[in-house]
Image (spheres, grey):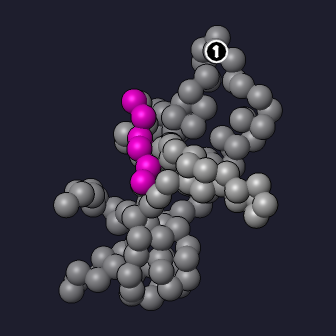
């Protein structure tokens, strides 16, 4: 197994080659599903005039940057008669949760997820 593959597997399964507990069976299956999703995504393409093209529908268009992030929102009140929890719209990221993981693009034409174009970084402005 080459070094790139080993690093990819260690990123998806941090307990590999350690004595750490792998977690529940559901955790392992979710990690496998996440790895599968990331492996099948293709990168978006940037045209000469700077437009992004989706690798799935092949169309230029608008994209959203999405990432997996843990955050928390405060539960305000509970209405028992309508069975509704009122959650504050503002959310906070706790210590250790400030950075999202697995940043990717979502095509707003077909809603497929794709990787960032090869060699591109993101900057939040």
Residue at 42%, 34% in the rendered image: 94
Residue at 55%, 73% in the rendered image: 112
Residue at 39%, 30% in the rendered image: 95
Residue 93 sits inside the magenta stretch: yes
* Magenta segment, prevailing SS (helix, strand or loop): loop
Relative to 41, say whether 103 is above or below: above
For this view, does 48 lie left or right of residue 3?
left
Across and down, in percent, residue 123 comes to: 22, 57
Say which residue label 1 marks.
20
* Screen quadrant of the C terminus: bottom left
Across and down, in percent, residue 67 comes to: 46, 54
Residue 97 sits inside the magenta stretch: no
* Screen quadrant of the N terminus: top right
The magenta segment: 90-95
> What is the crowding at mark 1: few (fewer than 14 residues within 10 Å), some, or many (at least 20)?
few
Across and down, in percent, residue 39 comes to: 57, 54
Evaluate whether residue 20 shows in this view. yes
Across and down, in percent, residue 62 comes to: 38, 81
Q: Which element carries disc 1, helix, strand or loop?
A: loop
Relative to 108, say whether 91 is above or below: above
Residue 79: name its quadrant: bottom right
Evaluate whether residue 2 shows in this view. no
């Amino acid at each position: 197994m080459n070094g790139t593959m080993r690093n990819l597997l260690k990123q998806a399964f941090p307990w590999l080659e350690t004595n750490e507990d792998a977690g529940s069976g559901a955790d392992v299956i979710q990690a496998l599903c996440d790895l599968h999703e990331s492996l099948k995504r293709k990168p978006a393409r940037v045209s000469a005039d700077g437009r992004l093209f989706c690798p799935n529908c092949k169309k230029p268009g608008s994209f959203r940057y999405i990432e997996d992030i843990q955050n928390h929102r405060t539960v305000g009140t509970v209405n028992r008669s309508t069975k509704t929890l009122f959650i504050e719209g503002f959310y906070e990221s706790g210590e250790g949760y400030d950075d999202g993981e697995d940043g990717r693009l979502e095509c707003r034409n077909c809603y497929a997820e794709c990787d960032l174009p090869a060699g591109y970084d993101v900057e939040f402005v």
